[in-house]
Amino acid sequence: MADFFASGETYRQAFDGQALPMLSYGLRFSDACAKEVERLKSSRIYVLTSKSLATQSDNLEKLKKTLGKNLVGIRIGIGAHTPISECLEMISKIKELDDGIDCIITLGGGSVTDAGKLVRFALANDAFTDEEVNTLWGGHSHNPKQRQDAKLPTIPLICIPTSLSGGEYQHIAGATETVSHAKRTFEPKVNPTLTIQDPELCLLTPQWLWLSSGIRAVDHCVETLCSLMSNDKGDEEARKGLVKLVPGLLRCKHDPSDIEARHLCQLGVVEAMSAVSSGVPLGGSHAIGHQLGPLGVGHGETSCILLPAVCKYNASKGANNERQKAVADLLLKDKNVQGILKGKETEQLDLGDILYAIIGELGMPQTLKAVNVGRDKLDKLAENSLHDIWIKTNAVPMTEKSQVLEVLEMVVG
């Protein structure tokens, strides 16, 4: 492990042509934090960390020791899907501080990251109540109450992710309303300031979360490459991300202590998110997955279940077969993929088959039954999916409930 940190810090823009976020790796997270705090001249820092990292490791203590007197507040734990009520609790605590804060650090997975993004957006707009925060969501989602004069966040945000969800590379944040429990999308238009990659820290991440969130990033790459509305930039970034993510995830499955494989996955996520930010509309796996999530299924697990099936569906309609074959050929070049397909006639396998084999090798759920979603939920799930922005940008645009049900029948289990 020590070898990974031997070369010192790499500090660069995460994406070409975008000032933020910056990206740091090669230092342990606490040391990278110390350097960034010094760069920013921050002296009033608020930390939000996942409960598991705070209670099952000494990582919060390491960060507290690093920040010293510059640390003015800590929040331990946030609910799944980032409840707005819990963000308001943090905002209230910050508001009580005499001189406020001048930096937020998040340490944990996607819900923690989203909370950090929402809190600083709310602070920039003096949004201290449910009603006031409710005027901040919207953009791609229509909110009749959305304020038109929302101010941009100014407090620096340092994200130290422990999963592969990728939210630490974009400004968009998802959070759940207190009363309706609807998931809202906030678009503060300012990316996090810095993302720190520390693969050693991620050894503590539950294996199912690491691998499933990695397949979510694979889904970003595959649906970009299979889109009939893709562009050269999106395709290039998605290819680069895919050839890091798939071997990295397979190596992590077979040796969870492989720190180089963990970092290969982290670098692949940067390129997956770069592909997403190129503006390519995604497809059915994401669209149906957005509606499967509220039924208690993690984002990454929705991709594990739906991505191969959506590829199969599109191929059966002859929609994007050339693009799918190009992705399949790319995956078949990898020795890790060749290993799991050994003994099979690879010429007979399509992209859906290859992805199904990869996800199966990772031990991830591949049916709705495996995540306790019964046949009784299919009708409503299909109906809700038709309202998603990306259902109509699938390679076969889905406008009828029967089309979504055809995909769901493949994965019902």
Image: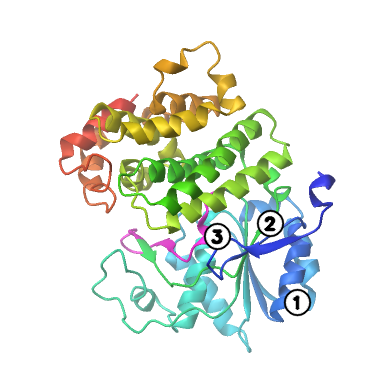
Q: Among all residues in the image, which is located at the extreme top?
A: 343
Residue 196 falls in which quadrant of the image? Answer: bottom right
What amino acid does circle 3 point to?
A: Glu
Q: In this picture, is 190 found above or below 359?
A: below
Q: Identify which residue is drawn at 58% across, 59% down.
A: 77
Question: Which one is earlier in the sequence, the residue at label 1 or at label 3?
Answer: 1
| Label number found at residue 38 | 1
| Label number found at residue 224 | none
Residue 7 falls in which quadrant of the image? Answer: bottom right
The x, y position of residue 292, in whole percent, is 34, 43
Tell which of 4 and 88 is nearer to you: 4
User: On the image, numbered disc 3 is attached to which residue?
Assistant: 168
Q: Among all residues in the image, which is located at the extreme front?
A: 232
Q: Which segment is the magenta one?
A: 164-183
Q: Mostly what secondary structure, the magenta segment?
A: loop
Q: Identify which residue is drawn at 58% across, 84% down.
A: 96
Q: Secondary structure at mark 3?
A: helix
What amino acid does circle 2 point to?
A: Ala
Q: Secondary structure at mark 1?
A: helix
Q: Identify which residue is drawn at 67% across, 47% down.
A: 202
Quarter containing the C terminus: top left
What amino acid does circle 1 point to?
A: Glu
Query: How was this image coloured?
Result: rainbow
- Label count reads 3
For the residues bearing labels 2 and 3, Cβ distance under 8 angstroms: no
User: On the image, numbered disc 2 is attached to which residue?
Assistant: 54
The x, y position of residue 135, in whole percent, is 33, 76
